[in-house]
Image (spheres, rainbow, N blue to C red):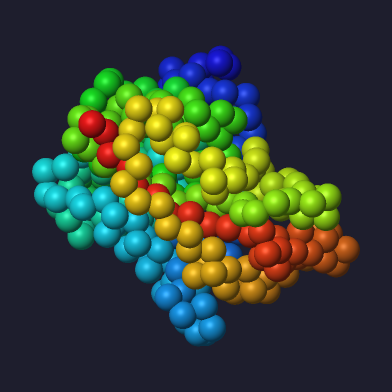
Amino acid sequence: MGPANSEGTMFDAFSREVGDYYDQANELLRAMFTDNVHYGYWPDPSSIDPLAEAGERMTEQLYERLDVSAGHKVLDVGCGVGKPAAWLARKTGATVKGANVSRNQLEVARDRVRSEGLEDRVSFDLADAMHLPYADDSFDRIWAIESMIHMPDRDQVMREMARVLRPGGRLAIADIVVRGTLDDVATAVVEGFCTLSTARSLEHIDNYPALVEKAGLDLLELTDVSEQTRPTGPAVLPAFDVLLPTLGEEGVAQSKKAWGDMFDLPQYGYVLLTAGKP
């Protein structure tokens, strides 16, 4: 456990690195992914639907798994700039709390809910998922969209989410993972992607049932949507050119290679899962 931040929340050292990364890269990431700041979902991977549309579909995939109703309290772990949280509140009438380690992203998220008139139902905290600053059994629903790749200890984060989830509550996770067996070449590609993305590591899809069970949760559903998310790779690739003034041609070429190689990898994976608290 690291020192407390200025708002009193305990921060893991790597979580601070992630927060710094998103503080610095926020505008770039919004340009690359739109304000959803997550991968897209293409039911037909051969389609040419734009990333913005596919990103909305990914949010809907999580929503369909959570079964959120008006009156529910929902925690968004790693809430980005708040677009999915605001969408969920508008869609369902639920109260949504977003947790994030990036001050820059939180500022954008708070501006968003003010402009959309959602301040009474959507709020955000500077908080580390390793040490969630909430009481036991605080939330009816939790979702974590592509935030698990940044977690220093997934077991601890799963336990924390289980702790703050009420009995009968539901958790939905979207995570970038690996599948199959990684040889030396694949391992190098994954390591390059993790460095580019400030990811601690990528979990193997086969390990998720045990992670859920160890946290005291029941696995309700696990779906491999690797092929439905793989088009995110080429869809985002051209946006790396905005880095030319900062990184130069060689730096941008290296970044594009690290990104593109991951999506070309047969072992690239993406999982959607739902778990319940007994």
User: Where, by quadrant of the figure, is residue 247 drawn?
Assistant: bottom right
Counting from the top left corner in percent of width and height, residue 130 is at 48, 26
Q: Position of residue 230 (x, y in %)?
A: 58, 68
Q: Left or right: where does residue 263 sit relative to residue 156?
A: right
Residue 245 visible? The answer is no
Q: Residue furthest bottom?
A: 47
User: Which residue is nearer to you in this view: 79 or 277?
Assistant: 277
Task: Measuring from the top left, give residue 57's x and y in whole percent.
Answer: 38, 68
Q: Residue at x 75, y 64 (%)?
A: 261
- Compare residues 20 and 267 and report the one nearer the observer: 267
Task: Give the residue displayed 83% in from the left and 50% down from the top.
Answer: 184
| Pick the front one: 25 or 257 | 257
- The vertical placement of 83 against 71, above or below, is below
Q: Position of residue 33 (x, y in %)?
A: 53, 64
Is 17 drawn above or below residue 122 in the view shown? Answer: above
- Rendered image quadrant of residue 86: bottom left
Residue farthest along the right direction in this orientation? 250
Q: Is residue 135 left or right of residue 225?
A: left
The quarter of the image holding the N terminus is top right
Residue 156 can be seen, yes or no: yes
Residue at image x 47%, y 34%? 211
Q: Is residue 202 above or below residue 50?
A: above
Q: Quadrant of the C terminus?
A: top left
Identity of the residue drawn at 67% across and 70% down: 237
